[in-house]
Each structure stands twice: as C-alpha cells, then as structure tokens.
Amino acid sequence: LDSATLDPGCFSNLDFKGTVTLNPGTYILDGGSLTTSSQATVSCNGCTFVLTNRDPSSTATIGGVNMNGGANVNLVAPSTGCTLGTAGCYDGIMMYQDRRASLTNSQTVNGNSSSVFEGALYFPRADLTFNGNAGMQTNCLQIVSWIVKFTGNCAVSNVCPTGSAGFAFQGKTIRLVE
C-alpha cells in the first residue's frame, strides 16, 4: 500500500510502501506476510498482527514478517479492551505467528532511529533477526522465538510505560543442549 489509512480485518498480504496509518485492532494475515519497504512510514497505536491460515491442515502456509531497514515503524500493541482468558484477546501482543509455521522460517524486524516497538513478538518456530539503530525505542519489547539474532547497535528496554498491557521482565536465556 502506498499512502493510506487502513482498518483492521483479514488480508492475504500487507505490503507497505508509503505512509500508512493503521487504525487500532487485529490485522489477520491469512497465509500471507507483513512487509515494509525501506522508505515506508507505518504507524499504529493498538495493533496486533496475526500470521495464520484459515486452512486447518498442519502443512498450511503461514506468512512472516520482513521490515526493511530505513522504514520508520511505530507499532504499539493494544493495552486495553479484552478480558484475560478471553479468546481473541491480544493485549500486549504486537505480532503473533501461528505455531504451525515451518521451523525453517525467518523473520526480520529492522527499525531506524525514530522507530518505536512496544509489545510482544511471538514467533515460536522462527529465526528472528532484530536490527536496529541507536535511539530506536523498544519499550516493553518481549520476544518469543526459536532463535533470536540482534544486529546493529540496538538496545532492548524492559521498561513498560504506564497503561501498557505488558509488564517489566528480567531477561533470561534458555538453551537446549543435546
């Protein structure tokens, strides 16, 4: 999409190229991916992206995320609106990838110095590469991924702003050794 304002819903792909404002809500990608070009400006306060597929088979195609460097991305997960334990409750979750995704999938999140990411990134079977520049804001960023790679001069903060759905956390590393 070039310059536009978008409402939540179900999409086959979201490919942002210009200045895009997303209204708060859940954006479901049915077998497709979320992509930003290097010159895109994308903002949403209260968005969750769900990468899934309505096909119930275990081999259904599950899309991914590729945010190119240079994009100015400002994404904040929803912080209110659902009751804990309620189906479809995504408070605090910015991106959620279906557990049926293949184990060999790779996700890339790049941000420039004015980008803001606030919320959880859930990619349980993916390799997630997180690139960033000094000054990028990563408030309350929580990452669940098979493998996480940090490149660039990014810093991840565990300070959660008042009113956000997340909670401060202590970083932990878990390794499975065979």
Image (cartoon, grey):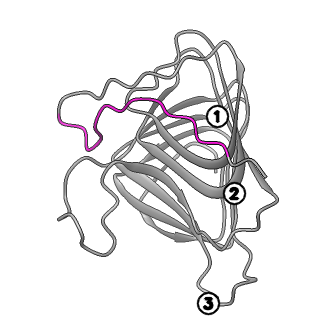
Q: Earlier in the sequence, mark 3 or mark 2?
A: 3
Q: How far across and how far down the image is residue 83, in percent?
A: 17, 65
Choose top left, top right, bottom left or bottom right for residue 147: top right
For mark 1, does the 10 Å Cα neighbourhood hold few (<14), some (14 to 19), or many (20 or more) residues?
many
Residue at x 66%, y 43% (from the top left corner): 175
The chief SS type of the magenta part is loop
Answer with mark 1 or mark 2, whichever residue precedes in sequence. 1
- What is the distance, in whole Å, between disc 3 and disc 2 at their CAs? 18 Å
Say which mark, if any, is on residue 64: 2
Give the image location of residue 104, x and y in percent: 82, 59
Give above or below for 98 relative to 75. below
- Residue 155 is left or right of residue 45, and the answer is right
Asked which quadrant contains residue 8, the reply is bottom left
Secondary-structure class at tag 1: loop
Question: Height in image: 52 above or below 97?
Answer: below
Q: Are marks 3 and 2 in contact (CB under 8 Å)?
A: no
Distance Cα–Cα, label 3 vs label 1: 33 Å
| Sequence-wise first label, 3 or 1 | 1
Residue topped by disc 1: 40
Q: In percent of the image, x 40 and y 62: which residue is there?
A: 26
Dot 2 amino acid type: Gly
User: Disc count in the image?
Assistant: 3
Q: Identify the residue position indicated by label 3 in the image.
A: 56
The answer to whether residue 138 is above or below residue 163 is above
How crowded pointer 2 is (Cα within 10 Å; few <14, some 14-19, many 20+) is rated as many
